[in-house]
Image (tube, helix red, strand yellow):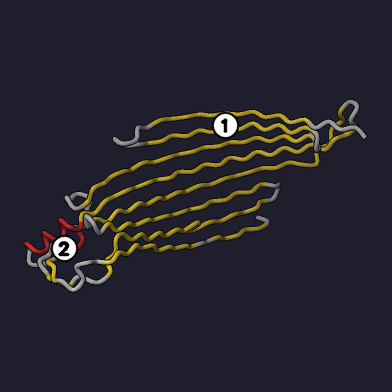
Amino acid sequence: MESASLRHSYNAEYQSSYATDTRAGEEEEAPNGQTFLNPAFKIGSSRVSEQFRPLFGVSITWPGSVETSVEWNQQTETFLRTANLKVEEVQTNQLSGSVSYQKRGMRIPVLGLGRLENQIRFSLTVSRSVNDERSYNLRGALADVRSADGSVDPDRITDPTNDYVQVRKQTTRVQVTPELTYRLSDRVTADLLVEYERFDGDSRQPSYTRVNGGFNVSVSISQN
């Protein structure tokens, strides 16, 4: 091992909207049976976003011009809808890894061009991403708290087997991308790329498998 580096990054964002309430100061009853005074400003909606990009990442350079890297990314977005008393949560987990090999310094004779330095590079990238979207019915949970005299277990509210939770989306995406690049000095460059993608969907988004490929050759001709 020649060198190694570790990466970690965290970013969070909070957004909220407010509106004046014409019934400010009036008494109102909540779904759980408790009463409160309407405030002068009410929250219309709130959003909290947390991102770990990456939660954990490591890159290693090995002897022989071989490089490897692994990253684990996490993102969670939570939305509060006060109009219908629901909380929506979107979670994304992605694990990716790559390996690349590069060989340079190969000099071969080319007719009319002398001995040109060649370079070849191969890379392979693999990633797996899981997306989960859920909606939590706070109005129904508060109503049950009222009927049970405040003795409802909080864990039941987040249990997907209960009516409080609606699983809106659960998908998995796997991508595999090998790429080969050949460079003949600065005059000729050839790229070969293949993209494989498998998507495991649900009732809202069907599953599919897709394979794309491409080949590109660029030639530069100049004369002094």
The residue sitting at 71% across, 47% down in the picture is 64
- Mark seen at residue 153: 2
Quadrant of the drawing holding the N terminus: bottom right
Quadrant of the drawing holding the C terminus: top right
Pointer 1 residue: 194
Quarter where residue 186 is shown: top right
Does dot 2 land on a helix, a strand or a loop? loop
What is the x, y in percent for residue 174? Answer: 45, 39
What is the x, y in percent for residue 48? Answer: 37, 61
Separation (CA) of disc 2 from disc 1: 51 Å
The residue sitting at 91% across, 27% down in the picture is 112
The amino acid at mark 1 is: Val
- Mark seen at residue 164: none
What is the x, y in percent for residue 167? Answer: 26, 46
The residue sitting at 80% across, 41% down in the picture is 105
For label 1, count other residues whose C-alpha is less than 10 Å away and answer few (under 14), some (14-19) or many (20+). Answer: some
Q: Is residue 55 left or right of residue 69?
A: left
Quarter where residue 188 is shown: top right
The image shows residue 139, relative to residue 41, as above or below, that is: above
Q: Is residue 224 left or right of residue 121?
A: right
Closer to the chain start, of discs 2 and 1, is: 2
What is the x, y in percent for residue 16? Answer: 35, 63
Residues 145 and 55: in front is 145
Residues 183 and 68: in front is 183
Does dot 1 land on a helix, a strand or a loop? strand
The image shows residue 220, relative to residue 169, as above or below, that is: above
The amino acid at mark 2 is: Asp
